[in-house]
Amino acid sequence: KNEVEQSPQNLTAQEGEFITINCSYSVGISALHWLQQHPGGGIVSLFMLSSGKKKHGRLIATINIQEKHSSLHITASHPRDSAVYICAALITQGGSEKLVFGKGTKLTVNP
Amino acid sequence: EPEVTQTPSHQVTQMGQEVILRCVPISNHLYFYWYRQILGQKVEFLVSFYNNEISEKSEIFDDQFSVERPDGSNFTLKIRSTKLEDSAMYFCASSEWGAQRLTGTSTAKNIQYFGAGTRLSVL
């Protein structure tokens, strides 16, 4: 049973297109992370949010706690945005916490 | 900008050997984590560590694994007797705050920052 589901698994876009990646989770969470993983393997935190919406440059993340759903949007996509985007649910239990990861969405932006 | 550093970037070892993966978390962070990613699979939680003890560990983190903070800066993951299936990318992460300080609204202090990873290859 996957506690965190992402869609689509793969996404190919043309430069300039608006991108949406979706994340649904089935567990109670404290917050949700959006992460970026480049081909070399390194992971970079993009956002952590527990309500509403956050924006950083061309990236926007939204979360709907009632619907247990989050989206990551990229406006005016660029080839350098090509990476795997991962959502991860922050689960807190009894004073400890851990991230539960989705399988990731591989984004390819063509020039 | 402060960052989490991991060494080595790539470790090759023979099955049955012990390996120690090293991490230097961001200096004012108090919460530390290890994750692993088998090639082609999703990232999985291994263990969280706070106040010199394990806060939580996953089923993967069996008796072959141990973590230590031997001094004020390093955070290590030891695998006692490596198996072929331990081959993976291992990520260390740290955050300034953890569960005890998460009060319902997210704050930058709860964000986990990841190292670049150590690729472990067990032959």
Image (cartoon, coloured by chain):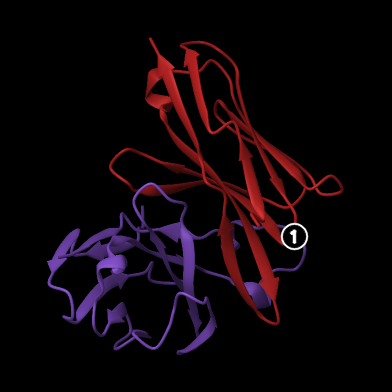
Towards the viewer: B121 or B106: B121
Q: Is residue A85 left or right of residue A4?
A: left
Image quadrant in which the C terminus of chain A is located: top left
Towards the viewer: A9 or A81: A9
Q: Is residue B121 left or right of residue A90?
A: left
Q: Which residue is mark 1?
A: A27
Subunit of mark 1? A
Q: Which chain is red?
A: A
Q: Secondary structure at mark 1?
A: loop
Q: Quadrant of residue B81?
A: bottom left
Towards the viewer: B39 or A74: B39
Q: Is residue B49 left or right of residue B71?
A: right
Towards the viewer: A102 or A41: A102
Image quadrant in which the N terminus of chain A is located: bottom right
Residue beneath the point at 51% across and 42% down: A104
Residue beneath the point at 55% across and 58% down: B111
Q: Is residue B118 left or right of residue B37?
A: left
Chain B shade = purple
Residue beneath the point at 39% across and 19% down: A79
